[in-house]
Image (tube, coloured by chain):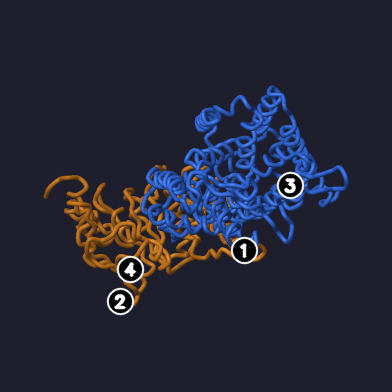
Amino acid sequence: MNALASQRAVLWPAFAATAAIAGFAYLFLRVEAQWEVVALTAGALVALLALGRTRLGAALGAAWSARPAPLAWGALLAASVVVALFAEDHFALLMIATVLLYGVACLGLTIQFGYAGVVNFSGAAFFGVGGYTAAVLATHTALPHLLVVAAGGVLAGAIGSLLVLPLLRTRGHYAALITVAFAILFKTFLEVNDALGGPQGLKVPGMRMLGWSFNDNIALGENTELSFYLSYAVFSLLLLAGALLLVRRLERSWLGLSLDAVRIDETAASVFGFEVARWKILAFTLGNVLAGTAGAVYAMMTGFVAPASFTLAESLILVSIVILGGLGNPVGVLAATALVVVLPEKLQVIQEYRFLLFSGFVILVLLFRPEGLLPRKLRQYLPGWGRA
Amino acid sequence: MNEATTLLRCEGLSVRFGGLTALNGLDLRLHEGEILGLIGPNGSGKTTFFNALTGLYRAASGRVWFAGAEITGLRPQAIYDAGMARTFQRSRLCLPLSVFDNLMIGNHRRLSLGLWFNLFRRSRFAQELQRHVERARVLLAAFHPHLPERMFEPAGALGMIDRRRVEVCRALISEPRLLLLDEPSAGMTHDETRELMDDILATRGRLPGLSIILIEHEMGVIERVSERCVVLNFGEKICEGPFAAVVADPQVQEAYLGVSG
């Protein structure tokens, strides 16, 4: 077997794993019976926890490390297939798109918390800034909607800079409290602000791009009509792919190194020339831009924004996703996003108790697996990195 | 000792914490390529002096010149850029990061930190990375032949002596003009300390311009390595000179042993 063939050979388990995950996602979205949901969830958790300790896990890691590009395309394809399989199913597509958009927001939090160590308890607020921006701009201006989405991100980043000064002057718990305060202020501000609809919120026009209206079902022939959520799911998938690529490249560069240095030891970092403030600002802003962008798309998809969707509790959910998945591990964060978003929808019994359940789960993870379900690995600057 | 070869000069450097004077009017001069031993009992102000030099503490009074420019009151980042690097008394490596990453933290000055470059010019980034990997490999190999093999392991997986070596490498990789070593022997055996000192001296052989200030409690190390000693006690310089002269000084003996006269 020549070298190329052997390189090819190691990719198959990884492709198979991607297919298995896609199959699992399909099943999970399809099943109705409560015991099936419980069984699938338990199976997924066991698989996630076991993966790190088996040779299969190591082989998958090695394959992704050696040849990430073909595997990433494979994953994108698999995700597209899952989306396509639900093309007529409003509810499943809404859930898929929600997972993808929350995933983008949680990747933003990963940059902030996982890399730079800046805890953000107002993630939902920045998500909301994006949503309200979309509501106002799409209603009152003729701005192309792609720019409206971008503006949601930019405005979230800009409003985040209001918090930068107090955040830089405090550390640890105190910095976290500032973001808690902002989350509460944001909701209160929206509730008393009549121009932004007060407690009732605002309606958001659906997305239109190049003459294509995202909010119309897609007629295929005589009897087939594809859900309008399909457009949103595809758009969200592309957005997530972009965010994932950004976060990956960020981490695998001197930028990621700088963020880590600042998080782990500010004093040592400053003695070696790192501008601590610069890196914290970069991470905080970039994270908020991602959250705001996702929030803008989400608002256009659901058609309305209201203060009650952007509470401190929602922000806590976002933070718990980042902790559950594994601080600084984008893949783990995506797995946790899927779990946390879909499970309450599928398992109606826990809908009421979801905060209780998730907080209990976060406590368990912090006690027994503080690095999260999928702990972050050492930085891989380049494919195949780390063989001395 | 003429003015041209002076690398570091302190005049009346004082550091106060509230009512406590940790460093009191220190005058000190270091010339290029010199190794200066800084000794004194616990709490005599040695580490405070390092912290003041590197900008972590703000001097209450006094001035400092380094490499021809005044650095009094500059931020740590600017002082690093001027060519000063240090180790810490209690190791401050980033243990979850790889050995290579730790070295690159010390190499900060030479990294291209532009957003566009890092995110979108990946092939040029890869070239720059490759150059730094080679430099890191050479430097680590100079300290111990087996260290380059462990370059991609977490720093936390290394034993005490290897961590110390990596910490010294982190300070050296940016090729500073002045290296501040804060008790490199702490927590190590005599043999390990001797090994580490040999490595440092060997490195200096290759970087002849490098000056070192060494804080050390092991008198054997100071005697072997330093060309001149400064003794601090209660934040003040009580003696200065070659090791043999300094240890014979009655004031120094009193400071260490507490006997009078």
Mark 3, residue position: A228
Does A23 sit above or below residue A159? Answer: above
Q: Chain B colour?
A: orange
Mark 1, residue position: A143
Does B164 sit above or below residue A282? Answer: above
**Circles 4 and 2: CB atoms closer than 8 Å:** no
Q: Callout 2, which amino acid?
A: Glu
Name the front one of labels 1 and 2.
1
Nearer the observer, B62 or B258: B62
* Tag of residue A184: none
Mark 4, residue position: B71
Q: Residues within 10 Å of mark 2 (few under 14, many from 20)?
A: few
The chain holding disc 3 is: A
Is B58 displayed left or right of B185 in the figure? left
Name the front one of labels 4 and 3.
3
Are labels 1 and 3 on one chain? yes
Name the front one of labels 4 and 2.
4
Q: Residue at x 53, y 45 (%)?
A: A306
